[in-house]
């Protein structure tokens, strides 16, 4: 195989995307445990799939820059953008996050499981037994009362 600069950039991008994917999966597992029962969340994987998928998603109404994880609680929107320790927001992401904040939404960029725990604790979205906890929790039954 012949490697060029573009191939190297693609390999670096793929490695970064894989690290972000793994981190986001860890965050989702923690959110399943620590969020109050009446807090809803989802993630929309908008990246990957190439140009054809991007064109389809755009036609379907997807706007670029939305946070990776969407949380709704008490009628309010909270967005969590997942980045690796070296990852940066794109200008489109930065502008959309500012626009969301301007209309009263909460948006945070997190780079670790501990950071997301701190953020959702600050937003008062965690079950009482996990409040003020910033260390990762063991997977288990999230059946305690909010």
Image (spheres, rainbow, N blue to C red):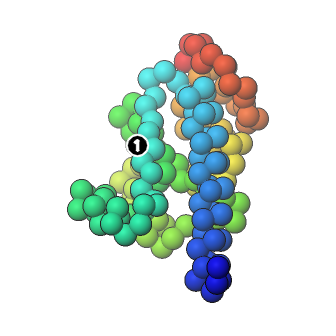
Single out the residue that lies furthest toward the right: 135
Locate residue 64: give its quadrant. Answer: bottom left
Residue assigned mark 1: 77
As rendered, which of 58 and 1 lies closer to the eye? 1
Rendered position, 123 above or below 3: above
In this rendering, does residue 101 appear at all? no
In this rendering, does residue 127 appear at all? yes
Asked which secondary structure carries label 1, the reply is strand
Locate residue 18: give its quadrant. Answer: bottom right
For the point 59% across and 42% down, the residue is: 25
Q: Is residue 89 left or right of residue 96?
A: right
As rendered, which of 72 and 82 lies closer to the eye? 82
For the point 42% across and 61% down, the residue is: 49
In the rendered image, residue 38, in percent from the top left (x then y), is placed at: 44, 23
Within-10-Å neighbours for mark 1: few <14, some 14–19, many 20+? some
Q: Is residue 90 left or right of residue 22?
A: left
> How many dots with numbers?
1
In the rendered image, residue 127, in percent from the top left (x then y), is placed at: 59, 22
Locate residue 88: give its quadrant. Answer: bottom right
Say which quadrant the C terminus sits in. top right
Rendered position, 17 above or below 114: below
For the point 59% across and 60% down, the residue is: 17
Say which quadrant the N terminus sits in. bottom right
In the rendered image, residue 135, in percent from the top left (x then y), is placed at: 76, 35
For the point 52% across and 24% down, the residue is: 36
Single out the residue that lies furthest toward the bottom: 4
In the rendered image, residue 87, in percent from the top left (x then y), is placed at: 64, 65
């Amino acid at each position: 195989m012949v490697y060029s600069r573009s191939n190297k950039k693609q390999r670096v991008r793929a490695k970064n995307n894989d690290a972000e994917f793994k981190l986001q999966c860890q965050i989702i597992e923690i959110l399943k445990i620590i969020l109050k029962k009446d807090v809803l969340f989802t993630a929309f994987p908008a990246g990957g799939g190439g140009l054809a998928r991007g064109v389809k998603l755009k036609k379907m109404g997807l706007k670029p820059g939305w946070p990776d994880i969407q949380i709704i609680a008490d009628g309010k929107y909270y967005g969590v953008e997942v980045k690796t320790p070296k990852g940066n927001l794109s200008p489109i992401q930065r502008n959309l996050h500012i626009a969301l904040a301007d209309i009263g939404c909460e948006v945070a960029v997190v780079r670790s499981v501990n950071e997301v725990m701190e953020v959702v604790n600050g937003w008062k979205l965690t079950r009482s037994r996990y409040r003020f906890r910033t260390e990762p929790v063991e997977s288990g039954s999230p059946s305690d009362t909010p």
